């Protein structure tokens, strides 16, 4: 995908404030600090479009971005940050489920995992929701530059075991080296076309 424009549209917490359902939409989900903003910024070739979070878990909003005037990307609020107040944590589940259940233009969700970590219960919960709502899902395993090829294979097996995902449903990515960028766009294109 050749990105010629990418712009912030708006933030929202509830459907009344979402932008109209005009364009096919791809949403990005993952634990706080997993590298979600970095992934989106690499995909759209814009360093600072999505603010990378020095304070993980602070942005409990859905952020909508329009790419090439015809594709909406949604940065979903990160989960699993210990220091988020309980009240905020309690909002997260319903906010996420409302979006996943109601957004008619949602074409696929990109779930981001860290190559160095065992997937958490919240990661698995997210995968279960995506299956329950029958939403096409792409799992991107990021920060691959941080591990050796050997370690990558070992960790991929751990992720496959914990999530039940087949190995070939994961794409490896690095925001640093940009490895996997074309593969991620390619797979998004396939899921949107399906
Ligand atoms: P978010 O909270 O999920 O949006 O995570 P960010 O994109 O803000 O990334 C969290 C931290 O991980 C930042 O310090 C990033 O620079 C770093 N990071 C993100 N992706 C990568 C990657 O692929 N490789 C490396 N080495 N660091 C990364």
Image: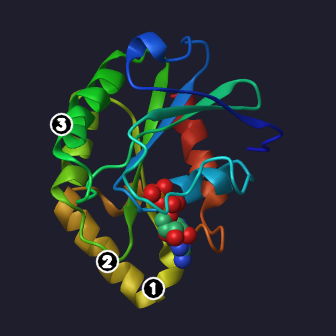
18 displayed left or right of 161 = right
In the image, residue 46 above or below residue 63: below
The residue carrying pointer 3 sits among few (fewer than 14), some (14 to 19) or many (20 or more) residues within 10 Å by Cα, namely few
Q: Nearer the viewer, mark 1 or mark 3?
A: 3
Q: CA distance from mark 3 to mark 2?
A: 31 Å
| x, y percent for residue 48 | 69, 53
Q: Dot 2: what SS?
A: helix
Q: Which mark is residue 90?
A: 3
Can you identify the residue that label 1 sits on? Answer: 147
Which residue is drawn at the image coordinates 61% and 48% (left, top)?
50
Name the quadrant containing residue 181.
bottom right
Can you identify the residue that label 2 sits on? Answer: 155
The residue carrying pointer 2 sits among few (fewer than 14), some (14 to 19) or many (20 or more) residues within 10 Å by Cα, namely some
* First reached walking from the N terminus: tag 1 or tag 3: 3
Of 18 and 90, which appears nearest the observer? 90
Question: Is disc 2 in contact with disc 1, using a CB cutoff of under 8 Å?
Answer: yes
Which residue is drawn at the image coordinates 23% and 33% (left, top)?
91
């Amino acid at each position: 995908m050749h990105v010629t424009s990418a712009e912030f549209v708006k933030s929202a917490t509830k459907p009344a404030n979402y932008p109209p359902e005009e364009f096919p939409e791809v949403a990005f989900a993952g634990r706080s600090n997993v590298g979600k903003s970095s992934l989106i910024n690499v995909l759209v070739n814009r360093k600072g479009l999505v603010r990378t979070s020095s304070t993980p878990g602070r942005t409990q909003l859905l952020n909508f971005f329009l790419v090439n005037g015809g594709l909406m990307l949604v940065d979903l609020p990160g989960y699993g940050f210990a220091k988020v107040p309980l009240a905020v944590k309690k909002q997260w589940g319903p906010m996420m489920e409302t979006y996943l259940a109601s957004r008619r233009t949602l074409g696929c969700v990109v779930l981001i995992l860290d190559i160095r970590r065992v997937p958490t219960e919240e990661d698995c919960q997210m995968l279960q929701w995506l299956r329950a709502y029958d939403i096409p899902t792409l799992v991107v395993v990021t920060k691959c530059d941080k591990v050796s090829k050997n370690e990558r294979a070992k960790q991929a097996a751990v992720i496959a075991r914990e999530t039940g995902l087949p190995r070939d449903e994961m794409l490896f990515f690095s925001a640093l080296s940009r490895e996997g960028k074309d593969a991620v766009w390619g797979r998004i294109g396939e899921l949107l076309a399906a």
